Amino acid sequence: MSTTFAAPAAPVSPLRTGPAIALLLVSAFVVVLNETAMGVSIPHIMEGFGVSAASAQWLTTAFMLTMAVIIPITGVLLQRYSLRRNFFTAMGLFSVGTAIAAVAPVFEILLAARIVQALGTAVMLPLLFTTVMQLVAPEKRGRTMGLVTIVTAAAPALGPTVSGVIVSSFGWRWMFIIVLPIALLAMVAGILWLRNVTPTMPARFDVLSVLLSAVGFSGLIYGLVAVGEGVVGNGGLPAWISIAVGALSLLGLVLRQLALRHTDRVLLDVRVFAGGLFAVSTVAIVVVSIALFGSLILLPLYIQQVLGQPAYVAGLMLLPGGILSGLLAPFVGMAYDKLGPRALILPGAVIVTGAMAAFSTLGTQTPVWLVIGMHVLLSIGTALMMTPLMTTALGAVKPLLYPHASAIVNTLQQVSGAAGVALFVTLFSVAAGATGGAPAASLAGGVGVAFGVGAAISALGIVLALFLRKPDHAAMASGADADAEEVTAR
């Protein structure tokens, strides 16, 4: 099959790329903020619809499973379709889902609306990453990726706080009512500002790859979520079966991609791992994501069940760290452009490990201000790590592989987030159950064990940081011509 690689004939003017990237940043921030905002609303939705906690939890679980199924196929979507088409598809789906959720008369319709929202979110995140890599010059990518980190790190942290304030003041439907006009305005801005300034190329879907990916990633995440939520024994699929089926399917997916790597039907091009730098950076992203998402689920639990604080106080206690993480991200990006990854990631990994170790000392009498200080420390560490890691990982592959690298990174973030939640909650539950004494003391002991293991995992980031370096952009650029010739020859 003969195909051609369509690329811009000349470098794209920053005047044209600036509004496009700004629009994608705002849009992605809104959809990701909405992703993590549902947790605080669960009790209110249970009361409003008269559903159990196990049923209501599917509002979060179904969202994650949909993301796990769709994100892996975005590599092909971003290659095959234009920037405008992908953007309007993503924001259109998100807007429709948001509108339905705002007026949902029964729980089942609300659940369906969340799935539609997730379809749009799953496309938006890889679209943002890929567009930045394709439009921004290598020497300026750090500062732009710093803004992207606000979306991937600060928005999830701010979601529970924002939703807590909205739900407490107006009710859970207002979470969607407030977001909907913002999403619609983004679509109007897209009509005015967005142009097709990124390259496209022919790509086909391999049905077997899509099936293996869907079963593999959804099975793995469902199993991990089941472990964290204690689904086993409550009529759900046993977690170990789901995880085993997911793992076997992913093994089949890898073998299938290796067989298709020289065709235009590859779903997730595993050649991104060939240079080693992408692999090391991605593993480090997984490590820091486990620490981040594990702490996001366990800290509110500790604040409410051990310290006896209400839910809105728990959200406010985590707010300073979330805000600081967002404020630091652009400056970390600018520092990356000058210093490279190791000078930032290494101290960041040390700080994250230290913060996790500090959390392992939490007790029944720990002052609120000290918990806030520990979370701020964790936020500083993750801010120092996430932007350099993302920039290094995506910069370590050839331009032709940007969509695939973006899809892989975003998918692994979803998996590692679910793994972090499952690991921390499981360790917390087991350790708390095995500890005698007063309930609060037992729960505090469980928190200590979970964060202690988290500190050990985070220490791996220190080791990985030693092997990181700035990608050779000249070599990547020189390889782009060879890639284009290879695509043309298919």
Image (cartoon, grey):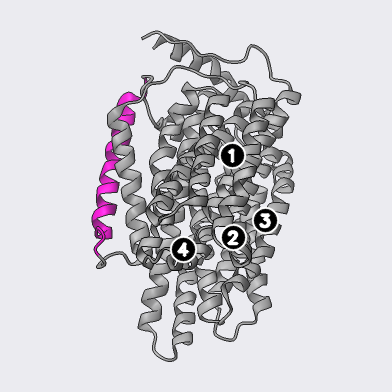
Which label is found at residue 45? 4
Where residue 303 sits in the image (x, y, percent)?
56, 76
Q: Compared to 172, does 407 lie above or below?
A: above
Where residue 83 sits in the image (x, y, percent)?
57, 25
**Mark 1 to mark 3 CA distance (whole Å):** 19 Å
Which label is found at residue 392? 1
Q: Is residue 255 magenta?
A: yes
Residue type marked 1: Thr
Which label is found at residue 94? none
Residue type marked 2: Ser
SS label for mark 2? helix
Dot placed on the residue nearer the N-terminal end, 1 or 3: 3
> Which residues fall within the magenta stretch?
235-262
Q: Quadrant of residue 74?
A: top left
**Mark 1 to mark 2 CA distance (whole Å):** 33 Å
Viewport quadrant of the C terminus: top left
> Which residue is rendered at x = 62% and y = 15% of the image?
8
Q: Quadrant of residue 73?
A: top left
Label 2: which residue? 163
